[in-house]
Image (spheres, grey):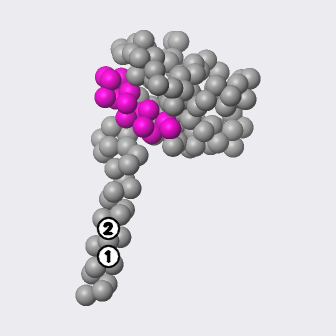
Amino acid sequence: MKNNILFGLILSFTISIGFLGHSQGSVNLISPKEFEKSIHSEKNPQILDVRTPQEFSSGHVSGAQNINWNDSDFKILISKLDTTKTVYVYCQVGGRSAPAHKELVEAGFKVKELDGGMNAWSSEERKVVK
């Protein structure tokens, strides 16, 4: 009996955590290698860095524009992006790009998110612009 209750609690908690980040079906997390390959395959890709301006200035993916997830105008600023083009989004590790990804999908964008953010990008020694 105790095992069944414990199992139910663990299962419930695990399912809840899964819904905090991305909704099923809309997630398009890609590795740094695939992210780089994808942005290089498009003419003028829309690369969105959702970190703070200070983080952005410390190093970012070439061609990225900075729209801070924590900015109160985030929804207004993303509305100026081209909905006919994919948005490539990232943050430092994924905590901000996950809700930004969801927001972008809800706004009608096709989104690809860098799995592991700038930490993963940098750990693979990919080019960073300052």
In-front residue for pair 98/61: 98
In-front residue for pair 65/113: 65
Q: Which residues are magenta?
A: 96-109
Whether residues under marks 1 and 2 lie with C-beta atoms below 8 angstroms apart, the answer is yes
Q: Is residue 82 above or below residue 89?
A: above
Q: Residue at x 61, y 29 (%)?
A: 52
Magenta run includes residue 29: no
For marks 1 and 2, give the CA distance: 6 Å
Q: Is residue 48 above or below residue 31?
A: above
Magenta stretch, main secondary structure class:
helix
The amino acid sitting under disc 1 is: Phe
The percent coordinates of residue 57 (x first, y second) are 70, 25
Instruction: Farthest residue to the front: give it.
Output: 72
Is residue 35 among what the camera can see? Answer: no
Magenta run includes residue 107: yes
Left or right of residue 46, residue 108 in this image: left
- Say which element carries label 2: helix
- Say which element carries label 1: helix
Which residue in the protein does label 2 denote? 11
Which residue in the protein does label 1 denote? 7
